[in-house]
């Protein structure tokens, strides 16, 4: 395996690394195979150390993981280096400078929301509903309750695992679009700075409680990755409404079902596989297209599946000229074209 030498070098640098490690427990779906080389990074220094060693192994593919709340990893796993971002106790606080709140890339979004409210900063209460990390939220341009990362991010400090360069990247250079950005698999968000406004903590706390209450009422618990399909364009119904109208609530393959509570959620029961999740997604996509003439695309990131399957679910905006240009610009900013 190409990653054996890499694992040995990471281990001898004192990093927490495992070969052939199950990735399922690191995701909210709880399915999928092993990562060939999985390293945990609890500080920016550790990510830098990983990048220094990785540069001797340019052939190895990379995957950065936060909380795994938007990832569907194939049963075959990922044959490359997985960098798992783990919050360290010392990096679990936000720093506040005037209207700006700064948080580490591994901080959980609900922690960001609560810490900001605790510091009397308003505007990030919606983040309490996103069960992922700040870095994952930047990459995905996560959003909800009428806001998203685009509306708050000033800039992010990003490390390229390929070049080792660390650059403060502006919101514009991050190339945000609906549930995505110009960041790719070799980019690690180390921290982000966001705009906020003064707000009494009591008001923030009640907004947080409202978001948490709304989520409990409208979304299922259990193993899922939130909304599976991106809402189609303006004027069309939401993906969930289209799936419901196609009679797909409760549709099941193996232990994997379309949620009865929220039609755009897919629930992975005990003993389910990534192949079954992908099969339910395929059935939903083709049935909705037959019934409504609208093609749905995945909001969840697929890892390790066949090229055909990835293309089938990949939103056309991923290959739009503007997106490709933004990606190339960011890669060059991070010294990846040298
Ligand atoms: C119950 C539930 C509800 C959800 N509701 C919402 C919602 O309302 N709105 C919404 O937008 N999403 C929602 N999600 C999806 C998910 O929580 C978000 O996309 C979240 O931002 C993903 O963060 P993560 O740390 O889990 O990323 P992961 O799932 O680990 O990774 C997602 C992507 O981000 C990349 N990534 C992760 N960390 C970093 C980093 N530090 N630097 C660079 N790239 C990184 C990964 O490579 C991958 O491409 C929901 C998920 C669940 C389970």
Image: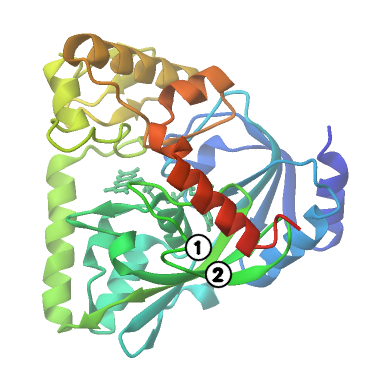
Front residue of 237 and 279: 237
Front residue of 8 and 192: 192
Residue 88: mark in rendering: 2
Residue 17 in the image: above or below residue 250: below
Residue 177 at x, y percent in the picture: 36, 50
Q: How many marks?
A: 2
In the picture, the quarter occupied by the C terminus is bottom right
Q: Which residue is mark 1?
A: 106
313 left or right of 236 in image: right
Residue 165 at x, y percent in the picture: 69, 67
- Label 1 – label 2 distance at C-alpha: 8 Å
Q: Residues within 10 Å of mark 2 (few under 14, many from 20)?
A: some
Q: Which element is circle 1 on?
A: loop
Q: Which element is circle 2 on?
A: loop
Residue 95 in the image: above or below residue 56: below
Residue 239 in the image: above or below residue 48: above
Residue 138 at x, y percent in the picture: 43, 58
Label 2 CB less than 8 angstroms from ligand 1: no
Label 1 CB less than 8 angstroms from ligand 1: yes
Please indicate, yes or no, whether residue 117 appears anywhere in the rendered image.
yes
In the picture, the quarter occupied by the N terminus is top right
Q: As drawn, which residue projects farthest toward the top?
A: 290
Residue 93 at x, y percent in the picture: 43, 78
Residue shown at the point (21%, 15%) measured from the top left: 293
The answer to which of marks 1 and 2 sits earlier in the sequence is 2
């Amino acid at each position: 395996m190409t990653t054996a030498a890499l694992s040995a070098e990471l281990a001898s640098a004192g990093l927490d690394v495992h070969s052939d490690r199950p990735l399922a427990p690191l995701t909210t779906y709880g399915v999928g195979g092993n990562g060939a080389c999985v390293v945990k990074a609890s500080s920016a220094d550790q990510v830098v150390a990983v990048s220094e060693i990785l540069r001797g192994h340019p052939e190895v593919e990379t995957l950065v993981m936060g909380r795994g709340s938007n990832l569907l990893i194939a049963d075959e796993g990922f044959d490359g280096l997985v960098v798992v971002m783990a919050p360290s106790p010392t990096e679990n606080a936000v720093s506040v400078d005037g209207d700006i709140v700064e948080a580490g890339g591994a901080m959980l979004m609900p922690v960001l929301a609560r810490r900001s409210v605790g510091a009397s900063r308003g505007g990030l209460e919606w983040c309490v509903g996103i069960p992922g990390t700040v870095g994952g939220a930047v990459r995905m341009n996560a959003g909800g309750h009428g806001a998203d990362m685009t509306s708050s991010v000033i800039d992010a400090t990003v490390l390229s695992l390929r070049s080792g360069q660390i650059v403060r990247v502006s919101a514009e250079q991050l190339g945000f679009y609906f549930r995505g950005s110009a960041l790719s698999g070799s980019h690690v968000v180390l921290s982000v700075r966001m705009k906020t406004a003064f707000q009494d903590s009591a008001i923030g706390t009640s907004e947080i409680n409202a978001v948490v209450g709304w989520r409990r009422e409208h979304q299922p618990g259990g193993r899922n990755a939130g909304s599976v399909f991106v809402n189609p364009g303006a004027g069309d119904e939401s993906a969930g409404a289209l799936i419901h109208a196609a009679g797909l609530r409760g549709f099941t393959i193996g232990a994997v079902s379309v949620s009865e509570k929220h039609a755009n959620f897919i629930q992975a029961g005990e003993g389910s596989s990534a192949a079954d999740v992908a099969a339910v997604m395929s059935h939903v996509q083709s049935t909705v297209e037959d019934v409504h003439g609208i093609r749905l695309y995945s909001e969840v990131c697929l890892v390790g599946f066949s090229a055909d399957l990835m293309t089938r679910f990949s939103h056309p905006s991923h290959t739009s000229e503007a997106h490709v240009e933004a990606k190339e610009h960011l890669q060059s900013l991070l010294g990846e074209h040298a």
